[in-house]
Image (cartoon, helix red, strand yellow):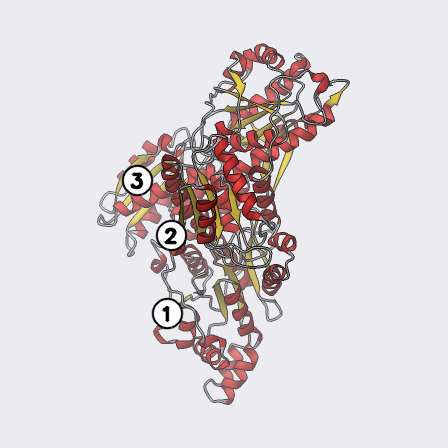
Amino acid sequence: MNAAVRATVRVGIYTGAKVYFVHEGYQGLVDGGDNIKPATWESVSMMLQLGGTVIGSARCMDFKEKWGRLKAACNLVKLGITNLCVIGGDGSLTGANQFRTEWSELLADLTKQGKITAEEAKRSSHLNIVGMVGSIDNDFCGTDMTIGTDSALHRIIEVVDAITTTAQSHQRTFILEVMGRHCGYLALVTALACGADWVFIPEMPPEDNWEEHLCKRLIAQRERGSRLNVIIMAEGAQDRKQKPITCDQVKNLVSKKLGFDTRSTILGHVQRGGTPSAFDRILGSRMGVEAVMALLEATPETPACVVSLSGNIAIRLPLMECVQVTKDVTVAMAEGRFQDAVNLRGKSFQNNWNTYKMLAHLRYRVAPKIHPLSVLFSPSQSNINIAIVNVGAPCAGMNAAVRSAVRTGLIQGHQMLAVHDGFDGLSNGQIQPITWAEVGGWTGKGGSNLGTKRQLPGKNIEQISLNIAKFNIHSLIIIGGFEAYLGGLELVTAREKYEELCIPMVIIPATVSNNVPGSDFSIGADTALNTITTTCDRIKQSAAGTKRRVFIIETMGGYCGYLATMAGLSSGADAAYIYEEPFHIRDLELNVEHLIEKMKTSVKRGLILRNSNANDNYTTQFLFNLYSEEGKGTFDCRMNILGHMQQGGTPTPFDRNFGTKMGAKSVLWLTDKLKECYRHGRIFANTPDSACVLGMKRRSLIFQPLASLKEDTDFEHRIPKTEWWLKLRPILKILARYEAVEIDTSEAATMEGSMENIVFPLNLEER
């Protein structure tokens, strides 16, 4: 919420608006007085890393009554406020829309009562409303993510990881209850992210006789060699008759029927607190900017809108339509239309649910080790061998993708082969079958358990083709960064000479640099971004007692400025230097002047980020020397090169979930492609669409032929020619208080002109 407040205030001021804080939610709006105060640029400094909301939030019964709304309207009119930005859940946003709808009536009543003059009423003749959804449950339809959800998942996963080590040591079953009275998003994504054995969500209760199925599932996991069981429950879990399913109920069932040592944990409000994740900071910032833009363009005829996230695009949707669909989910659950409830939650929720069901509930078939090609597709099993290889630098989330691919392949009846140490291992024959049990617990492990190297196929193509034939490999999954992409292209090019390479292949982007063509996001980038953001927080905090200090930090990414840009947004940097946006000595001079002016305010800290290959001559050391020299007498400098710590660490919930879905989808695609390519008793794939990159575009996972991506690739600098996140760089500059910045953050909105009325952010409710 604080990121959204900060962005709304600063962009509002940037456009010439006078911005007000409303403290304590609607209660502050009703009470007025000191609860409504002017906001300044400095008053929202150092807010990004704080959880909760610094302007307070409260449930307010007074606002539900007309007399309360009359008082609120009077307070707004007296201050000349005609634009309201509301951050809250569907109840808060519905209340805001009602307030707007009856605005004219409220003004008439206030004029009649003599509390405002006719002139004041005329000046405030209409009220513009824009909403941002703040809810850790992600229970609002119309947006892919709500503010707070990702941070809540971080808190949950931290607990799950801690509990898992204990459960494994003592061979225990753990039941974890997470928030979600009416929405199972947190429980579902947690189950995917930790590889839970069972999940209870309100939208899709378990089938009748679920107790027996649950026990069988837990026993089967133990028989496969697992030392623990994990069960995730949403607090609103229910059965098909809408009777609550509780932690104690499940605990007693497992303890008495199976005799397993069972523990239960209810997380409660720990999920709401803590430092916000990098994703939430960027999401709140983007939504805050878009909210101000929506108010800039609003007219008396414009319906109240809510700022939403669709893929990686900030959009505006009619508020009440989204509220209605959200209510329809509750109605569908109450009427027992559970599949409708899942569908109404949206495509992302459906994909999560389908992936979970496949990985956790379907029984898999064990395929024999080697089969002749003539019996590839027998009625009982596929007889397909799929090899998985990690290529390039290791990153968090690779193991989640491998686990998901292995288990999905086994479910399909395939034999899964693990290739160790990248393309080197493929050429040296470091290939062996990998089983269901072997990948247990891999979801939460960083790095690459298979081992990975940067070496490309190159001179080893012939040996690789021989091993593909020797080990009877029918398709290949390559997980990695730009080297994986280049390696895939080399293998496809070599098909003309080596027939053994005419097999379906899929590249899964996995690199902290996020520089693989064909995908907006890569596995591992989110974990690296959170590592950088956390480090920047600590570095900035170290200057709390040291006035006038500027930090210059170098991030990874090669020639791709994704990490530097997004870390700049999430940590509140004053500048982020990247290769894609060339900078010159005059730009550096302006940045120094900007920091000198900043030191005259109450905010006496500066943060400069530089991508590792941003410029050959303006190195990190050069920038440090320049800022140190020019800042003499005003500020001093410190330099940090973060290095390989950005590649390590435990995967974030996003990377675990993303890797899990990518791995599963790649195997399902290969299964269909193999059937297409099966001719006359053998596999032969040489069409462009038989070797693809699986990438995230907007909000969908799509397969794009490697050959078709070459035109959009800058091979010299190892980056795509088109990068969506470059449109966010103006936001970074505006929030750092640079002048004359043009901005275009959505397909439907642009910022032009100046603002005459007043904007202010308002936080509502805990949810």
Of labels 2 and 1, the one closer to you: 2
Q: Look at mark 3 in the image and give the residue it sits on.
A: 627
Q: Who is closer to the viewer here, 649 or 332? A: 332
For this orientation, the residue located farthest to the right is 680
As measured in the structure, the alpha-carbon distance from the residue carrying label 1 to the one carrying label 3 is 37 Å
The residue at the point 71 percent across, 24 percent down is 377
Within 10 Å of the Cα at label 3, are there few (<14), some (14-19), or many (20+) other Cα atoms? many
State the image coordinates of residue 451 (x, y, percent, origin top left): 45, 22
Instruction: Identify residue type, mark 3.
Output: Tyr
As measured in the structure, the alpha-carbon distance from the residue carrying label 3 to the one carrying label 2 is 25 Å
Say what secondary structure mark 2 lies in: loop
**Left or right: 603 with respect to 276?**
left
Instruction: Note whether 207 is above or below 394 in the view shown.
Output: below
Say what secondary structure mark 3 lies in: helix
**Left or right: 493 with respect to 6?**
right
As measured in the structure, the alpha-carbon distance from the residue carrying label 2 to the one carrying label 1 is 20 Å
The residue at the point 50 percent across, 72 percent down is 82
Q: Earlier in the sequence, mark 3 or mark 2?
A: 2
Of labels 1 and 3, the one closer to you: 1
Q: Who is closer to the viewer here, 260 or 691? A: 260
State the image coordinates of residue 23 (x, y, percent, origin top left): 38, 68
**Left or right: 540 with respect to 174?**
left
Instruction: Identify residue type, mark 1.
Output: Lys
Instruction: Identify residue type, mark 2.
Output: Leu
For this orientation, the residue located farthest to the bottom is 113
State the image coordinates of residue 275 (x, y, percent, origin top left): 37, 50
Residues marked 2 and 1 touching at CB (< 8 Å): no
Q: Look at mark 2 in the image and give the residue it sits on.
A: 48
Instruction: Note whether 527 is above or below 346 in the view shown.
Output: above
Q: Who is closer to the viewer here, 682 or 447? A: 682
Q: Earlier in the sequence, mark 2 or mark 1?
A: 1
Q: Look at mark 1 in the image and give the residue it sits on.
A: 37
